[in-house]
Image (cartoon, rainbow, N blue to C red):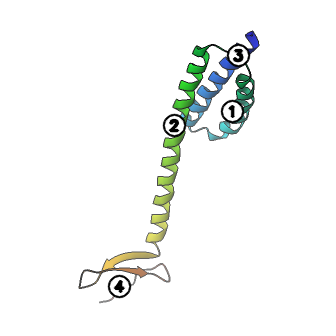
Amino acid sequence: MSGDVGAFDALLSNLTSQRQAIRDGDLTALAPLGARAADLADIVASAPSANDDHAALKREAERLRQLLGAVLQGVRSARRRVQAVRAAGTRFETYDSHGHARAVILDSGKVERQV
């Protein structure tokens, strides 16, 4: 049973380490931590435990899930911004004299001013 408790503690520590790695921006640490977490989760899943063990793991897993959700949202936002910046160099929106939006696509990436 003490090996089971060790697995619960190790998994809890691993989840905390994953969360900290994300907060620190150390994304290279996530792959080995994730692999270790999967191994520990298999051990924990087959081990009898107290409800307190499960509750602590559930809380930490939820904190990690929320953080990963925020990271994913940030990555998506950054990707949209990069795409918008790239598009700004090749096209832009303008309006005609009637107020209708028109996309102007630039062939050479240079804006030519006409007088």
Q: Position of residue 27 (x, y in %)?
A: 62, 40
Q: Position of residue 1 (x, y in %)?
A: 74, 10
Of marks 4 and 2, which one's residue comes earlier in the chain? 2
Q: Amino acid at mark 1?
A: Leu
The secondary structure type at the circle numbered 2 is: helix
For the residues labelled 2 and 3, say whether their Cβ atoms are less than 8 Å apart. Answer: no
Of marks 4 and 3, which one's residue comes earlier in the chain? 3
Q: Is residue 18 above or below residue 85?
A: above
Numbered circle sitting on residue 67: 2
Q: Is residue 99 left or right of residue 46?
A: left
**Badge 4: few (under 14), some or many (20 or more) residues near its Cα, within 10 Å?**
few
Distance between the alpha carbons at the discs numbered 2 and 1: 16 Å
Q: Given this view, does label 4 or label 2 mark the residue nearer the observer?
A: 2
Q: Position of residue 48 (x, y in %)?
A: 70, 16
Numbered circle sitting on residue 48: 3
Q: Amino acid at mark 4?
A: Arg
Of marks 4 and 1, which one's residue comes earlier in the chain? 1
Q: Is residue 44 left or right of residue 107?
A: right
**Badge 3: few (under 14), some or many (20 or more) residues near its Cα, within 10 Å?**
few
Of marks 3 and 1, which one's residue comes earlier in the chain? 1
Q: Position of residue 10 (x, y in %)?
A: 68, 20
User: Which residue is under mark 1?
Assistant: 33
